Amino acid sequence: MDIATSEAPIGQTGDSVLRADSYPRPRPLLLRWGKHLRGTFDRLIAASSLVPNTPVLDMRAFPWTAALRADWEAIRDEAIAAIGTQPGAPSLAAISPDHRAIAPLGKWRSLFLCGYGYRVDENLARCPHTSRLIGQVPGLNSAMFSILAPGTHIPAHRGVTKGLITCHLGLVVPRDGDVRMRIGTRTVRWAEGETLVFDDTYDHEVWNDSAHTRIVLLIQFRRPLRNPGRWIADTLLGVLRRSAFVQEARANLCRWHRGEIAADV
């Protein structure tokens, strides 16, 4: 991958044993049937929200984002070093089968730091400064470096629950093209060192119409809620954490670190 602000390319993975698509499984029951109830759950959670339910939220409502902006260069340097060191960052589609419809292999890659409360100790150890900062995020659910290859389009999709809010910190943002995201009817663009806080349950899609790689630190955290929305969101997140949606991705990530998955073929 060619990074606009770095001379060193981000490393690719080596030879592996198992193709990422060699063990397809049906979508988890929670995702196949839960989507029919998602609208009801999201409305109940929205009614209990202590922050606005708009597609894009004011970052000043989340004071902890200031620490990310203040130390963004250190986070960027750790991200580039970690991604460039073997085994690097796998394709999201290789780790999370549910993303295969929107994330072509080799186009959208993620270096996971934690997911649904499960730590990825190998990667946290490689990024100690980032690890300390994300540890200060209230209600942290997941954190990863999200890496989008040149010319990639991620088609329209939605997050699984309004109980989570997403924050992006721009780390490497190409300037030679148009790198953007549509959230609902609004189009936003990243900037290096700036945070973008948004509700991913709104229909959204992403473009990297440039010749270089885009990297952001992606954080998902629990929406500030009062009851009954807090109880509903906590219950949903507890179910998700135990579901095949998360557990299969967790197992695949372990296989990746053992070199058993060819994630970019």
Image: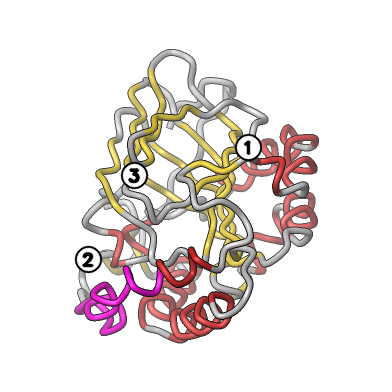
Cα distance in 3D space between marks 1 and 2: 34 Å
Residue 135 rendering spot, x and y as whole percentages:
76, 62
Residue 108 rendering spot, x and y as whole percentages:
37, 46
Label 1 is placed on what type of residue?
Thr
Residue 226 rendering spot, x and y as whole percentages:
63, 72
Give the residue displayed 59% in from the left and 45% down from the top.
Answer: 217
Relative to 193, say whether 88 is above or below: below
Label 2 is placed on what type of residue?
Asp
Cα distance in 3D space between marks 3 and 2: 26 Å
Question: Badge 1: few (under 14), some or many (20 or more) residues near its Cα, within 10 Å?
Answer: many
Give the residue displayed 58% in from the left and 21% down from the top.
Answer: 5
Label 3 is placed on what type of residue?
His
Q: Nearer the viewer, residue 102 or 235?
A: 235
Cα distance in 3D space between marks 3 and 1: 17 Å
Horizontally, residue 50 falls left or right of residue 208, namely: right
Relative to 96, say whether 175 is above or below: above
Horizontally, residue 78 falls left or right of residue 152, namely: right
Horizontally, residue 135 falls left or right of residue 39, namely: right
Which residue is the site of mark 1? 195
Most common SS among magenta residues: helix
Which residue is the site of mark 3? 204
Which residue is the site of mark 2? 21
* Element marked by disc 2: loop
Relative to 145, say whether 113 is above or below: below
- The reply to whether the C-beta atoms of the residues labelled 3 and 2 are less than 8 Å apart is no
Q: Nearer the viewer, mark 3 or mark 2?
A: 3
Q: Nearer the viewer, residue 140 or 125?
A: 140
Q: Which residues are magenta?
A: 26-42
Q: Please report whichever mark, 3 or 1, sits nearer to the chain's N-terminal start.
A: 1
